[in-house]
Amino acid sequence: MKNLKNKFERVSQKFVNKKEYYKKIIDKWRLKNDLSMYNSANSLYEKTEALFKEITENFTATVEGQLKPEYINKKIKEFKRVSKKLNDITKPVWQQWIEAIVFAGSLVFVLRTYVFGLYHVPTGSAEPTILVGDRIWGNKTVYFFNKIKHGDSVIFDNPRFIYDKSSKINYFWQKYIGLPVPLLGLSAGPDNWVKRVIAIPGDTIEGRVENNRTVIYRNGVKLDETAYVNKYPLICLRKTTGFLPFNSIGMINIPGFLVSVKKLGFYTYDPEKSYDNQPFYSMKESEIKKDLYGLPILREAYSPSYIYDYETGDIERSVDNFGPIRIPEGKYWVMGDSRKNSEDSRFWSLLDEHLIHGRASFVIYSVDSEEALWIFELIKHPIDFWFKNIRYNRFLKWIK
């Protein structure tokens, strides 16, 4: 019985300390003629007060052998439930908002970290399976129950990213949040990449160039990759993103996605169709980067890629000649479907399993835009956005 009494004292302490506060709030609602809140809170207060008195009196009766501990324990639980409701309903509005925001933020954090991820695709390394501007759903639970297998399109952190471990706060922010907040000194986290798993632990992988065409051998067998490797050439285009022609205001840095930037990039191109009738990206003649002869700069599918010596301009090696490499436990060999536009295991070797978030499941929606936020594209091109930029045929498209 002493344990029950101590338990009740702990449970009831907040009510005893805040009785005057509860009365003050309830009386304020009565004076404001807010009958709905007054009646609800007053009813809870009277019920809590009645339970408090009953339990206090019953302790004496129990000592005398008139009541059982099970009955008092049941009443304590009821008191705890009712007093919590009373405490919640009388909280200041600002406190309720803060608690709601903290709860929602914590829930989103857990869901985004362990259940699913929503990803914006900024590069064309997985074309034509995944296009620049796709927003994809990443399943983070799939590898809790299944092993990573050949052909999976896995989502992972940039393996070359270096975390700021000099600051615990910034390290946590980079690892779990990732969005840059320059005003608070919080840096961006690693980019998320999507590549296809070509080899898993225990496999032996080898890349060759045969008849000037790249091929992959796994465990001594040449792979048929026609189902997913990009068969189209890539064309070089000039693109512009952002709005602002400056990157800072005084000492304050402007977030990078707001700054106007011109860049060159390679995009999947169907040479059998005109520029304004391309199946993957809308293209304009003015965006085409041309060589000295006035011809579009192209990268042909299945042609070898090379690493050059930037000082001499000489070819150092072809990244498509590698191996044979045996894949150890906890490592994977991954490659982009658009081999001519992908920085993958050919460049930075094996992918650590701990960097993998999950598997790319499907495209939620797709906007033909380089902008980090699609609203920017809408502002820039309010008419074309609805009729040209939105790829309605890619909505809810499964990624194979």
Image: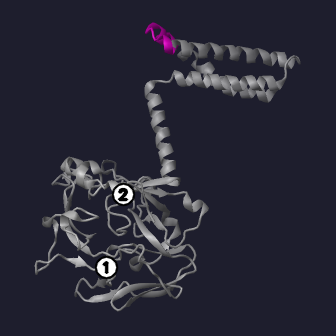
Secondary structure of the residue carrying tag 2 is helix
Q: Quadrant of residue 257?
A: bottom left
Q: Which residues are magenta?
A: 26-37
Q: Position of residue 343 (x, y in %)?
A: 36, 74
Q: Is residue 50 left or right of 117 when viewed as pictured?
A: right
Q: Residue at x 55, y 60 (%)?
A: 142
Q: Which residue is mark 2?
A: 394
Q: Which mark is residue 279?
A: none
User: Is residue 2 one of those drawn in magenta?
Assistant: no
Residue projecting furthest to the bottom: 211
Q: Main secondary structure of the magenta part?
A: helix
Q: Residues within 10 Å of mark 2 (few under 14, many from 20)?
A: some
Residue 201 is left or right of residue 392, and the answer is right
Give the alpha-carbon distance from disc 1 to disc 2, as whole Å: 23 Å
Q: x and y percent of residue 67 in the render?
A: 85, 19
Q: Secondary structure at mark 1?
A: loop
Q: Residues within 10 Å of mark 1 (few under 14, many from 20)?
A: some
Q: Is residue 253 visible?
A: no
Residue 128, horizontal then vertical, whole percent: 35, 68
Q: What residue is disc 1 on?
A: 301
Q: Amino acid at mark 2?
A: Arg
Q: Amino acid at mark 1?
A: Ala
Nearer the viewer's eye, disc 1 or disc 2?
2
* Image spot of residue 116 (x, y percent): 49, 53
Q: Is residue 102 left or right of residue 71?
A: left
